[in-house]
Image (cartoon, helix red, strand yellow):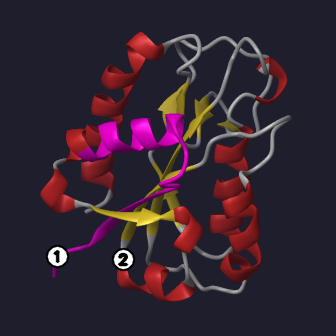
Protein backbone atom coordinates (compact mmCIF):
# COMPACT_ATOMS: atom_id res chain seq x y z
CA UNK A 1 0.00 0.00 0.00
CA UNK A 2 1.28 3.43 -0.89
CA UNK A 3 1.11 5.79 2.03
CA UNK A 4 -0.40 9.17 1.22
CA UNK A 5 1.37 12.30 2.44
CA UNK A 6 -0.17 15.74 2.92
CA UNK A 7 1.47 19.05 3.69
CA UNK A 8 -0.86 21.27 5.69
CA UNK A 9 -0.28 25.03 5.76
CA UNK A 10 -2.26 28.23 5.44
CA UNK A 11 -2.57 29.23 1.79
CA UNK A 12 -3.19 32.81 2.99
CA UNK A 13 0.10 33.46 4.78
CA UNK A 14 3.26 34.84 3.24
CA UNK A 15 6.32 33.41 4.98
CA UNK A 16 4.81 30.04 5.94
CA UNK A 17 3.42 29.59 2.44
CA UNK A 18 6.83 30.31 0.89
CA UNK A 19 8.58 27.82 3.18
CA UNK A 20 5.83 25.24 2.55
CA UNK A 21 6.32 25.65 -1.20
CA UNK A 22 10.06 25.05 -0.70
CA UNK A 23 9.19 21.85 1.19
CA UNK A 24 6.89 20.73 -1.64
CA UNK A 25 9.56 21.43 -4.27
CA UNK A 26 12.23 19.61 -2.29
CA UNK A 27 9.92 16.64 -1.58
CA UNK A 28 8.86 16.26 -5.20
CA UNK A 29 5.46 17.56 -6.25
CA UNK A 30 4.10 14.14 -7.22
CA UNK A 31 4.56 12.59 -3.79
CA UNK A 32 2.70 15.11 -1.65
CA UNK A 33 -0.64 16.89 -1.63
CA UNK A 34 -1.13 20.44 -0.33
CA UNK A 35 -4.01 21.04 2.10
CA UNK A 36 -5.12 24.48 3.26
CA UNK A 37 -4.91 24.51 7.06
CA UNK A 38 -7.91 26.82 7.14
CA UNK A 39 -10.03 24.11 5.48
CA UNK A 40 -8.79 21.22 7.60
CA UNK A 41 -11.41 18.69 8.69
CA UNK A 42 -11.67 15.23 10.18
CA UNK A 43 -12.44 13.86 6.69
CA UNK A 44 -9.23 15.36 5.32
CA UNK A 45 -7.15 13.87 8.14
CA UNK A 46 -8.62 10.44 7.53
CA UNK A 47 -7.47 10.45 3.88
CA UNK A 48 -3.73 10.56 4.64
CA UNK A 49 -1.21 8.45 6.54
CA UNK A 50 1.62 10.97 6.82
CA UNK A 51 1.47 14.69 7.46
CA UNK A 52 3.89 17.58 7.28
CA UNK A 53 2.38 20.42 9.28
CA UNK A 54 3.32 24.09 9.16
CA UNK A 55 3.01 25.66 12.61
CA UNK A 56 4.38 29.20 12.75
CA UNK A 57 4.57 30.67 16.24
CA UNK A 58 2.41 33.75 16.63
CA UNK A 59 2.80 36.51 19.19
CA UNK A 60 4.31 35.29 22.46
CA UNK A 61 4.32 31.56 21.76
CA UNK A 62 0.84 30.87 20.41
CA UNK A 63 -0.62 28.74 17.65
CA UNK A 64 -1.99 30.60 14.64
CA UNK A 65 -5.78 31.16 14.70
CA UNK A 66 -6.46 28.50 12.06
CA UNK A 67 -4.76 25.81 14.21
CA UNK A 68 -6.39 27.10 17.40
CA UNK A 69 -9.82 26.80 15.78
CA UNK A 70 -9.16 23.19 14.68
CA UNK A 71 -7.69 21.96 18.00
CA UNK A 72 -11.10 21.05 19.58
CA UNK A 73 -11.88 18.80 16.56
CA UNK A 74 -8.36 17.38 16.63
CA UNK A 75 -8.65 16.51 20.32
CA UNK A 76 -11.72 14.37 19.54
CA UNK A 77 -9.86 12.28 16.95
CA UNK A 78 -7.95 9.02 17.19
CA UNK A 79 -4.69 9.57 15.30
CA UNK A 80 -3.18 6.13 15.93
CA UNK A 81 -1.25 4.82 12.92
CA UNK A 82 -0.67 8.31 11.50
CA UNK A 83 2.69 10.06 11.41
CA UNK A 84 3.18 13.79 11.77
CA UNK A 85 6.23 15.95 11.10
CA UNK A 86 6.01 19.59 12.12
CA UNK A 87 7.99 22.58 10.96
CA UNK A 88 7.49 26.09 12.18
CA UNK A 89 8.69 29.59 11.70
CA UNK A 90 10.11 31.52 14.59
CA UNK A 91 12.46 34.41 15.40
CA UNK A 92 15.38 33.51 17.69
CA UNK A 93 16.38 37.13 18.28
CA UNK A 94 12.97 38.81 18.51
CA UNK A 95 11.30 36.06 20.56
CA UNK A 96 14.11 34.01 22.16
CA UNK A 97 11.98 33.02 25.16
CA UNK A 98 9.37 31.17 23.08
CA UNK A 99 11.20 30.24 19.90
CA UNK A 100 9.01 28.01 17.71
CA UNK A 101 6.69 27.15 20.61
CA UNK A 102 3.89 26.29 18.16
CA UNK A 103 5.83 23.19 17.02
CA UNK A 104 5.83 21.87 20.60
CA UNK A 105 2.21 22.83 21.29
CA UNK A 106 0.97 21.01 18.18
CA UNK A 107 3.20 17.99 18.87
CA UNK A 108 1.75 17.64 22.39
CA UNK A 109 -1.84 17.72 21.06
CA UNK A 110 -1.07 15.17 18.33
CA UNK A 111 0.62 12.80 20.77
CA UNK A 112 -2.28 13.07 23.23
CA UNK A 113 -4.54 11.91 20.35
CA UNK A 114 -2.32 8.90 19.62
CA UNK A 115 -0.42 10.34 16.64
CA UNK A 116 3.26 9.59 16.13
CA UNK A 117 5.44 12.71 15.85
CA UNK A 118 8.59 12.21 13.78
CA UNK A 119 11.23 14.51 12.31
CA UNK A 120 13.16 15.53 15.41
CA UNK A 121 16.10 17.85 14.71
CA UNK A 122 19.21 18.99 16.56
CA UNK A 123 19.38 22.31 18.41
CA UNK A 124 22.81 22.83 16.87
CA UNK A 125 23.04 26.14 15.01
CA UNK A 126 20.21 27.84 16.91
CA UNK A 127 20.51 30.45 19.68
CA UNK A 128 17.44 31.01 21.88
CA UNK A 129 16.42 31.03 25.55
CA UNK A 130 13.58 28.51 25.64
CA UNK A 131 11.12 26.66 23.44
CA UNK A 132 8.15 24.35 23.99
CA UNK A 133 9.43 22.50 20.91
CA UNK A 134 12.41 21.14 22.90
CA UNK A 135 12.63 17.49 23.90
CA UNK A 136 15.94 16.98 25.61
CA UNK A 137 18.59 18.28 23.22
CA UNK A 138 16.36 18.11 20.14
CA UNK A 139 13.44 19.95 18.64
CA UNK A 140 10.30 17.87 18.07
CA UNK A 141 10.25 19.22 14.51
CA UNK A 142 12.11 21.63 12.24
CA UNK A 143 12.48 25.26 13.33
CA UNK A 144 12.88 27.75 10.50
CA UNK A 145 14.11 31.28 11.25
CA UNK A 146 13.56 33.33 8.10
CA UNK A 147 14.31 36.54 10.01
CA UNK A 148 17.85 35.67 11.08
CA UNK A 149 18.94 32.50 9.24
CA UNK A 150 17.14 32.54 5.87
CA UNK A 151 20.31 31.32 4.12
CA UNK A 152 20.13 28.08 6.11
CA UNK A 153 16.51 27.25 5.24
CA UNK A 154 17.04 25.29 2.01
CA UNK A 155 19.72 23.04 3.56
CA UNK A 156 17.68 22.46 6.70
CA UNK A 157 14.62 21.50 4.64
CA UNK A 158 16.64 19.16 2.40
CA UNK A 159 18.21 17.31 5.36
CA UNK A 160 14.90 17.11 7.23
CA UNK A 161 13.02 15.71 4.24
CA UNK A 162 15.67 13.03 3.68
CA UNK A 163 15.09 11.99 7.30
CA UNK A 164 11.29 12.12 6.92
CA UNK A 165 11.24 9.94 3.84
CA UNK A 166 12.81 7.19 5.97
CA UNK A 167 10.59 7.83 9.01
CA UNK A 168 7.36 7.96 6.98
CA UNK A 169 7.80 4.38 5.67
- Which comes before the other along the chain, label 1 or label 2? 1
Give the SS element for disc 1. Answer: loop
Q: In screen coordinates, is 85 left or right of 62? A: left
| Dot label at residue 101 | none
Image vertical order of residue 55 relative to residue 122, above or below: below
Q: Quadrant of residue 31?
A: bottom left
Residue 119 at x, y percent in the picture: 44, 45
- Label 1 vs label 2, nearer the camera: 2
How many discs appear? 2
**Residue bounds of the magenta highlight:** 1-24
Q: In screen coordinates, is 47 left or right of 75? A: left
Please state which of residues 35 and 75 is positioned toward the viewer in this rendering: 35
Give the SS element for disc 2. Answer: loop
Residue placed under numbered mark 1 in the picture: 2
Q: For residue 7: magenta?
A: yes
Residue 83 at x, y percent in the picture: 44, 65
Taking the spot 72% from the left edge, 78% from the top edge, the residue there is: 75
Taking the spot 54% from the left edge, 64% from the top edge, the residue there is: 37
Taking the spot 86% from the left edge, 35% from the top edge, the residue there is: 60
Residue 110 at x, y percent in the picture: 63, 66
Please state which of residues 153 and 130 is positioned toward the viewer in this rendering: 153
Q: For residue 51: magenta?
A: no
Q: Residues within 10 Å of mark 2 (few under 14, many from 20)?
A: some
Residue placed under numbered mark 2 in the picture: 48
What is the CA distance from the residue labelled 1 to the residue labelled 2? 10 Å
Taking the spot 32% from the left edge, 48% from the top edge, the residue there is: 164
Q: Residues within 10 Å of mark 1 (few under 14, many from 20)?
A: few
Amino acid sequence: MNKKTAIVYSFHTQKSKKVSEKVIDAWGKTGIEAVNAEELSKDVLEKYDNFILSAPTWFDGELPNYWDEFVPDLEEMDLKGKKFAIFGLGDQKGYPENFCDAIGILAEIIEECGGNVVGYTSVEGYTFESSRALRGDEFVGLPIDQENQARMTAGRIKNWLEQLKKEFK
